[in-house]
Image: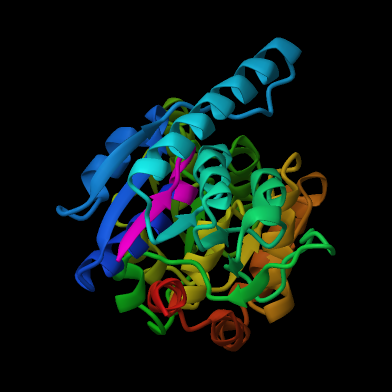
Amino acid sequence: MKIWIATGGTGGHVFPALAVAQELASRKHKIIISCDGRVRQMVARGKPESARMSHIWASGVGAKSRLKQIWALTKIGVSATALTLRFMVSRPDRVVAFGGYASVPAVFAAHLWKIPTFLHEQNAAIGRANKFTMRWVKTLMTSFSTVDGIPSNSSARVVYTGLPVRRDFLDAAGAPLPNEMKLLVTGGSLGAQILDDVVPAAIASMKNKKIFVTHQTRPENVERLQRFYAENKIHANVLSFIHDMAGAIVASDLVIGRSGASTVIELETIGRPAIFVPLNINPDQAANAASFAKLGGGFAIEQSKFTPKWLSATLTELFDNPSRLAKMAQKALVPNHAVELIADEITK
């Protein structure tokens, strides 16, 4: 079977697509992956050896400038036309889109040629691009059991599959808490200033400073945070990048971070309690954090309410009650079979 996988924009769209591509390739299907220039190297490094690549001319339409929005829509339109012509000559058996603006051209072209089309939504609230393309897809596969914003008039089947994660996260599923008062702070690859400001101040005000902190931050903030932790006699390892994120999560008793879909699902896969501070301009992150909190695995707190005083009290309560952290970890644990479920859904 020839399967076209459309992805692009950010790692949140690319990594799940690559995980599924690897699984489908192992089942001897022919894979073509389309992506925009922004993630081309990322896809080239992670794709199956047998998979081919196709470049999509596209960019996001969320810019405030009307001219930039028109230009972005023009690029998506040109790419949609190009793929429509390409599918006329060499038609795939399935098209699988992993969201974002770069997936729109392939979904549109597949619709015109009546190719069975599948869409994956990473977040607990459907994104703009996916909401737009829902009218053309056969099946919507979701990372979370409930997803807000799905159009009521959509005829697409909705299937809860979960979000594909890398093998090292799957291998660490259910790892017990170390019970060593270890805290992991991560704001994603670019860090998060609110975490850099609030977390160190909160720990410094605590009576019990036996917490060991692993803190990922922006490169320009590393020296400042190292100095603050040292001056306040707090054991900390401050890094600009964590290469082994699965290992860092396993080594922690509690995680504080943003609530992008991949972060939330990775914690659910391993089973770790967390305090999520959603990016205040991103409704997707708020929905992801709320879904995690509903499981009982942790807290979702608005950025405006995330203060040193609140965090200090919360950390004291949690680390003084290790049994509560253990129960939260158990509730956070969600078995992840997303890669197999998605591949089965596409090929059945």
Point 59% across, 74% down: residue: 319
In this view, the residue in front, 106 or 58, is 106
- 90 displayed left or right of 286: left
Q: Which residues, given as a range, are shown in magenta?
A: 1-13
Spot occupied by residue 265 in the image (x, y as percentages of width and height): 52, 67
Spot occupied by residue 56 in the image (x, y as percentages of width and height): 42, 32
Spot occupied by residue 118 in the image (x, y as percentages of width and height): 53, 62
Point 76% across, 53% down: residue: 309
Point 76% across, 57% down: residue: 301
Q: Reply yes or no: does residue 2 show up in magenta.
A: yes
Image: 141 above or below 78? below
Q: Reply yes or no: does residue 337 show up in magenta.
A: no
Point 60% across, 20% down: residue: 74
Direction top: furthest residue: 67
Direction front: furthest residue: 89
Image: 198 above or below 203? above
